[in-house]
Amino acid sequence: MIDLQRLIDIVGPDAVLSGEDVRSRSVSWVNPGPCQAYAIVRPSTTEQVARVLGACSAAQQPVVPMGGLTGLVRGCEAGPGEVGLSLARMHRIESVDPVGRTMTVEAGVPLQAVQEEAERHGLLYPVDFGARGSAHIGGSVSTNAGGNGVIRYGMTRDSVLGLEAVLADGTVISALNRMIKNNAAYDVKQLFIGTEGTLGVITRLVLRLRELPRSTQTALVACNEFSAVTALLKHMDASLGGALTAFEVMWNEFYRLVTTTPAKGTPPLAQDYPFYVLLESSGGDETRDQEVFEVALGAAIEAGGVADAAIATSKAQGESLWALRDDVEQIYGIGMPVTFDVSLPVAEMEGYTGEALTRLEREWPAYRRFVFGHLGDGNLHLIVAGPPSREARLGIERCVYEPLARRGGSVSAEHGIGLEKQPWLGLCRSPAELALMRRLKAALDPQGILNPGRVLPA
Amino acid sequence: MIDLQRLIDIVGPDAVLSGEDVRSRSVSWVNPGPCQAYAIVRPSTTEQVARVLGACSAAQQPVVPMGGLTGLVRGCEAGPGEVGLSLARMHRIESVDPVGRTMTVEAGVPLQAVQEEAERHGLLYPVDFGARGSAHIGGSVSTNAGGNGVIRYGMTRDSVLGLEAVLADGTVISALNRMIKNNAAYDVKQLFIGTEGTLGVITRLVLRLRELPRSTQTALVACNEFSAVTALLKHMDASLGGALTAFEVMWNEFYRLVTTTPAKGTPPLAQDYPFYVLLESSGGDETRDQEVFEVALGAAIEAGGVADAAIATSKAQGESLWALRDDVEQIYGIGMPVTFDVSLPVAEMEGYTGEALTRLEREWPAYRRFVFGHLGDGNLHLIVAGPPSREARLGIERCVYEPLARRGGSVSAEHGIGLEKQPWLGLCRSPAELALMRRLKAALDPQGILNPGRVLPA
């Protein structure tokens, strides 16, 4: 392990934590136990990050990059013998360009601070998810976070124009592009997006902003058939001409749970439909957007397939519809939750959920099953809840993951792999793909000191 | 050089061209002279591509992947001692998924065939550019082509969900993902998008399709100030809530040229404004979209800044406005054209064009200067035309490229680097970035047989 004095020489004594100072911190949001890292170092500049990594490289010291520690797959948990590299002190919003619609920030800025700064300029940073208050923007990029607006604005990858990153050997890669179009040789920033800190440490970012929507339309729609859900997706997307911002679906069991006491929500539509769709569009014409939305939805009702619908007529009503979708917490009261974040082609979803749910019911009848998610993006969340048991967890994972493989699905839609999902990675990535990933890892981090053992199984 | 019999053993005698059969073909669209390649091999399957590359790898035989040969930067020109690997026989559209809105194709399908097949399913493949009839979809992905709809739909990269590629050593990488969201480890497809065939040969693709727009609105707007142009971009983008599909700008000299005899176009607006903006939006509500568009444009006129405007009231009128923008050919009659495809932050454009045009006028007064482009994406095309001269070409390139560097611009927005733009790559990429690119090249193609010397200077 590296001599801590070498790190202190670079960042100063108050920026290197060890012993009790480390132990008094939680490992991560999903793992509240005491952090067992050898040390946590908190550089304030890119140059310090580069020198820290250079020193760790020379000492063959494993390093785990740390953002807001809100990742869900244990990709950011520094353990014994590892140095945690926290970006928390690099939290400066450097500039906003309202004409080019970009923001340049350090990696440690919380997502919510980025969103709020954009809004102050009449602009939108469109990536959004529950951990916004704690998650660092750098971490959200290194995990290519998804969230709610993906159907319109894409994943985090689509909101990153440029970045600066430091390689394992301390080399600073400055690729702070500010344009939508730049085909001057390889787009090296892609190496650091979604690779969970295994190929480099992101230190600065140029983010793409959008014009802030002026109006929002929200509705909850019930369908009796899955085919009606997919027809509605196509119809609304086509009718709204680019304005559709969310197409979230709740299966019956989930809807009943979040609209029944002890949940706070009440049912805006009867509780006996198999599928509920939460629709949202955002536009720029406050006078006409609601009408366009209602005309489009009206045409869907007239065409049949939509069993019932509730259109929000105020911001508060829209928020109360979203509150149902977001009340995942209700499930945690039931028992050990086994949570999934899978994706698969929309046309495969009905067959897939049928197969997985049937198998779960047969093999693990004591566990309740909830399905919901960002259907418009091909992303489903399943949560299976019941008595705590390691054996049950593994069995439930087999029931959910195995039917994905032959349907071209993915074991991780938006959360990443980290340590948590490694056992299942081979179900959706071929040996040749995994070998290519290892080639990249070896090329960029030949000693394997950056987030070792994460993402790619050792 | 490889023994051609080895290639014939893999693909059959009619799929290996040599001697006169090669010489009778053009090098490329921009270089109509006879092709000097050692041979051209035309495999019909991915397996054949893999075996050809495996054999070339064993023989250390340089290979140049060939699509429709419409690239503009000489990245696809096979020369003496090189084997051209043509994907022309792999032109099968394999499937369309109208629910998941994807199309799976072989790499040799022409762009236009992809667009037309999408339309038959009521869907849109949104990438579009002039060479659509000849360009292969595989080539468009390997160059990350831009074009007209980028402001709404992004570059080609944003329309690729999955791909299959063959590495230099013949390894097949099958990453045929069909979902918008897939964070299961590294997104290896990014390695083959925009790397111009230097890291692998794309053989198959899963493309993302969109719902086909039902209405199109087009207008030509004149502005007296550049600041009014950028204000209009923000205003229209915000007002149209996701529907803006083009924001093209023509500087005065370009507009005058394409609206004056011998050009076929006539001026819809007076010829004495400094800037002309071609606006387009596409929506899903034929009844209301035109009104929303006119209300938004009306508000811009009322706010001042817009000097004059002509709104198309028919499809034919819209097409005639686009015909002006597309009549670049007028410039070629003037003399040797030196063409540029640069990008830079929109806020820098006025200062940049002022500097570059002033310098061109001072240093090369005998040459006429035309500026136009996809301003909404930060992409400008400059064409400087006059007496043929190698010295003038180099001098003109200096005038245009040098002022880009300190403004964070790029010497290639959408055309790529190939051989053509290598001398200027160092102006917009740092030595550390270039070194990282070389690391990637060495990791994926250690012998350097794939498109050698292209993109990265030797």
Image (spheres, coloured by chain):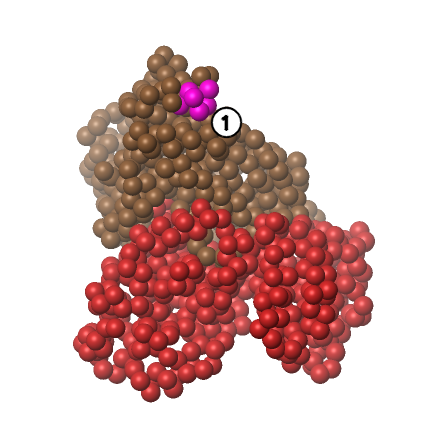
Chain colours: A red, B brown
**Residue A197 to residue B61: above or below:** below
Q: Name the image quarter holding the C terminus of chain B.
A: top left
Q: Quadrant of residue B319?
A: top right
Q: Is any part of residue A347 visible from this angle?
A: yes
Would residue B429 be found to the left or right of residue A117 on screen?
A: left
Q: Quadrant of residue B421?
A: top left
**Region rendered in magenta:** B7-12
Identified by mark 1, the residue type is Ser
Label the magenta part by its dominant secondary structure: helix
Q: Is any part of residue B293 visible from this angle?
A: no
- Taking depth in this image into account, of A456 and A364 the one nearest to the observer is A364
- Badge 1 element: loop
Residue at image position (28%, 59%) is A447
- Taking depth in this image into account, of B141 and B238 the one nearest to the observer is B141
Residue A344 horizontal/vertical position (percent): 60, 54
Residue A337 horizontal/vertical position (percent): 61, 74
Q: Residues within 10 Å of mark 1 (few under 14, many from 20)?
A: some
Residue at image position (21%, 76%) is A3
Residue closest to the far top: B20
Residue B428 horizontal/vertical position (percent): 27, 48
Report in which chain the residue with disc 1 lies.
Answer: B
Residue A388 horizontal/vertical position (percent): 61, 77
**Residue A432 to residue A169: above or below:** above
Residue at image position (38%, 19%) is B5
Does the magenta-highlighted stretch encompass residue B161? no
Q: Quadrant of residue B70?
A: top left
Residue at image position (22%, 67%) is A59
Instruction: Look at mark 1 in the image and give the residue it sits on.
Output: B44
